[in-house]
Image: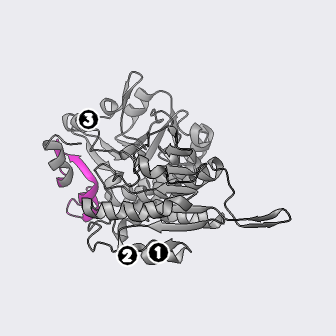
Amino acid sequence: MKIAVPKEIAAGETRVALTPATVKQILRDGHEVFIEAGAGEGASISDEKFTAAGARIVKGAERLYESGEAVFKVRTPLQQGGVDEAGLIKKDGVYVGFLSPFSTKETVKRFLERNITSYSMEYVPRITRAQSMDALSSMATVAGYKAVLIAADRMQKMFPLMMTAAGTISPATVLILGAGVAGLQAIATAKRLGAKVEAFDPRPAVREQVKSLGATFIEMELPEDAETAGGYAKELSPEFIKKEMEAIGSRLPKADVVISTAQVFGKKAPLLITGEMVKLMPAGSVIIDLAAEQGGNCELTVAGKVVEQHGVSIIGAVNLPAMVPTDASQMYGKNIVNLFQYLYKKDTDGPDITDDIPKGCCITRGGEIVNESFKAAFTAGGK
């Protein structure tokens, strides 16, 4: 198959869907790879490096899309600057990449009109044999790491305990809300920097993971059914959220940094910190809200902005992996190639649509929506 990798046009996006290493990996299966000129610049990958790996460089988006039967992207196709990415994908073609299908209905409609088979990286099932394809987890790892570094740069204290001739510097206290992949990486990074770390998550199963990283798990009565069979957090009852907020509020007066990562797949992020609760935090402290694009865990969060309230900096973190594009592109490229190689195995006619992996992440095929959970939201008019 001929695979096209365009330059991302979303504002601030520096990642690229393939790297020279993953180009070589996919060429070994007999595919051809076409890269738009300059696609790797944001990740410090030159056209010459792609050429050396065996890819062909194509100038211009239109020519690039004409070259490929399949398109690999990072961000969902956009209409921007006179470029209609969904409209450029060949009819009857294949799209593999993040799709954000709940918030990009127009893109999905174009896919249906053009009979495009689309695979959404968000929907790769969280099962053992799909771990190497799980781009959500890969990017969450990068985001959790980067969030701690942003907090360390923004706050007015140092992270580690220091014994100096001028006296003892006490360690910073970091509170992590949500111990998924991003939260666990944030815990590990904050601990490596020497902070005192506390964490909370409504899923009892993560208690030992939190403790194994050296953090204190905030104890409270936890629900037994806090996650779906696919490993995503469930939307919890208002009663439980109220108790959760009380537990969080009791820790805020000593928290120098709060990193919130709580999200519910396909829905608005839960509100965990109200504006009144922010007043409890010490002056000079920082909140990094990784759920900013889903509405935020903090009431004062504005996606992509830094809000100063009550002496606290509230950072609406957006697309942190794009701030670490070299490694983020390497991880994402490996994920997308592993998925593609699983879907389009050698000596087969195409994906086995009864298999859990293609069944889980395929959104459109044959002019129809084939993902049942998305179909319900789409036909109901929801995002």
Q: Name the residue under label 1.
A: 209
Residue 80 badge: none
Which of label 2 and label 3 is nearer to you?
Answer: 2
Q: Give x and y (percent) for residue 243.
A: 33, 65
The magenta span reads 347-372
Q: Give x and y (percent) for residue 131.
A: 40, 66
Which of label 1 and label 3 is nearer to you?
Answer: 1
Q: What element carries label 3?
A: loop
Q: Mark 2 and 1 residues: CB-CB less than 8 Å, in contact?
A: yes
Rendered residue at 53%/32% (across/down): 37
> In this view, which residue lies farthest toward the top?
82
Lower sequence index among marks 1 and 3: 3
| Chosen colour scheme | one colour
The amino acid type found where label 2 is placed reads Ala
Residue 91 badge: 3
Residue 205 badge: 2
Quadrant occupied by the C terminus: top left
